[in-house]
Amino acid sequence: MFKNILIIGCGLIGSSILKDSISKKISKNIYVFEKSKKNISFIKKIDKKVKFLKKIDHQVSEMDLIVLCTHMSQYNDIIKKLQKYVSLKNIITDTSSTKRNIQRLIEKNKKLKKIFILSHPIAGSEMSGPEHGGKNLFKDKWCIIIKKNDKLNKSSKKVEIFWKKLGSKIIFMNSVDHDKIFSITSHLPHLIAYNLVKTAIDFQKKNKKNIIKFSAGGLRDFSRTAASNEIMWRDIFFNNKDNIIKSINIFIENLNSLKRQIKNENNKNILKILKNSKRVRKKIIELKQDISKPNFGRDLI
Amino acid sequence: MFKNILIIGCGLIGSSILKDSISKKISKNIYVFEKSKKNISFIKKIDKKVKFLKKIDHQVSEMDLIVLCTHMSQYNDIIKKLQKYVSLKNIITDTSSTKRNIQRLIEKNKKLKKIFILSHPIAGSEMSGPEHGGKNLFKDKWCIIIKKNDKLNKSSKKVEIFWKKLGSKIIFMNSVDHDKIFSITSHLPHLIAYNLVKTAIDFQKKNKKNIIKFSAGGLRDFSRTAASNEIMWRDIFFNNKDNIIKSINIFIENLNSLKRQIKNENNKNILKILKNSKRVRKKIIELKQDISKPNFGRDLI
């Protein structure tokens, strides 16, 4: 399908793309640009045929598809280097979790505007690094491809085919909607999880009680989310801060209202909120966004 | 070990106790008091030897151990009936998630004060009903047994042996500490999960966008917690409201501080909070309160 693919940054996402690209024979040659020596030695074990670029230079002009998989805070530097060497023959895509900021970066350059198609595969875990990357990470997962001014250009088609080959289901969206929607379904949940764990740590320090060992009653689920990579999430929080701050404000409003209802023992309202929640869970399972087994199946013996 | 055990209320917890009591041969006879016809027909299928009490009457005086497993809002009625028939020969225990309120109930009666030993097994799932009860639900899980005035009475020993037979690890605690600790490790996480799902529903209604289908980015984990039984959780929120309201206030304080730090892009502080969170996750896994597999193992193919 492709002759040369270049994966820039080979952590959890990059290495998963690498493994799938090899097993699905998506490209004749697969190149990797990765700074970490530890990661490189790990990637070498995946497949001996993987080629490494030592720097971003004229060689990138030979790549049919370049996939950016680094932390967002590295995008600026990498994009500056890429734009020196790429031509209209190349296609670039990425995997970042916020999109308006990356769109602003590429809009500055006429070439990039045409060949850079933003994408966001909704896949990952609390683990990072190529040792946790796996085949089929993208299978049956959504991949958002960003439309510019609600239009698709030619390069989009190739990016769409690429993600479909990895098993993703494609949805096209503009970057404004993207950043708004994921501020609620992904960024706020992570922020809340971090905040809950912080609240538990503060309580433990203040009360000098070992409470972490009782986390199976609920806290442990949040602690998984709150164990996600700190660089990735700092980048997300900073780059989508307008939407995230709005989400926090609505969340706090709702929480204050819930607090009042508990204080007044408002039976009817509380039961309504709790029952509505259960319906959302049902919907999430129907939409195959989660497994239906109790406790995610983890307690079953 | 026991001659007669009575399980009052046979939902998820009661039916799990029933199954374990049968398989571990804890009692010669096992009696069940259950109001729901649907549940009764389900329990009959578990084992034909299970005996059913039609009402709480003089027969309870023959029980060596009575285990209350109903919703807390039914405790008042049941305890009133029990105290008519029990004597100092009986032992009663329970499984509720808040303890000061139940302690207040039994303290009113001289007999109950001596024979009622409060306990709280830290086990369960978002599912309710006997169809979801299972063997080994309590295996290697904490079970809190409540000390009165930091003292244990004779009946405690038998209750301790009972839970140990089911595989639980025992911790003794007073009810004040119990309600404080679990307001942070269990009640607040559930409340926050309900509130997050409500915030997502509100967003979806206001923006007329289907966001639930993108819940794999974080929301889905919270939706599992927020699918827990609404009667159980209303009872917990109302009965531990002083501690829960304090927890909410600290949570909101922390969240406002996190919001300010995101607004100001306070890199150092944000990274510190996010890294500390990861350490708590590590501790939780070390303490065997959760499995170590990424994504709770649910995404692995």
Image (cartoon, coloured by chain):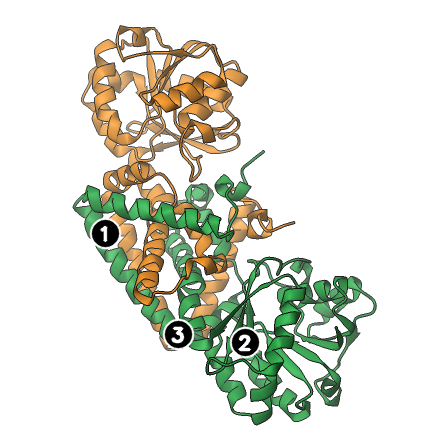
Chain colours: A green, B orange
In which quadrant is the N terminus of chain A drawn? bottom right
* Residue at x-position 63% and y-position 68%: A163
Rendered location of residue A164, percent (x, y): 63, 66
Q: Is residue B44 above or below residue B136?
A: above
What is the secondary structure assignment of the residue under circle 2?
helix
Dots 3, 2 in contact, CB < 8 A:
no
The image quadrant of residue B197 is bottom left
Residue at mark 2: A72
Residue sticking out furthest to the left? A264
Question: Is A164 left, or right, of B51 in this rendering?
Answer: right
Q: Earlier in the sequence, mark 3 or mark 2?
A: 2
Q: Amino acid at mark 1?
A: Lys
Rendered location of residue A58, percent (x, y): 74, 90
Q: Amino acid at mark 2?
A: Met
In which quadrant is the C terminus of chain A drawn? top right
Label 2: how many residues lie within 10 Å, few (<14), some (14-19) or many (20+)? many
Q: Are marks 3 and 2 on the same chain?
A: yes
Q: Amino acid at mark 3?
A: Lys
Dots 2, 1 in contact, CB < 8 A:
no
What is the secondary structure assignment of the residue under circle 3?
helix
Question: Is B89 left, or right, of A281 in this rendering?
Answer: left
Residue at mark 3: A241
The image quadrant of residue A143 is bottom right
Instruction: Name the residue nearer the viewer: A139 or A96.
Output: A139
Between marks 3 and 2, how big is the CA–CA gap?
Answer: 14 Å
Residue at mark 1: A259
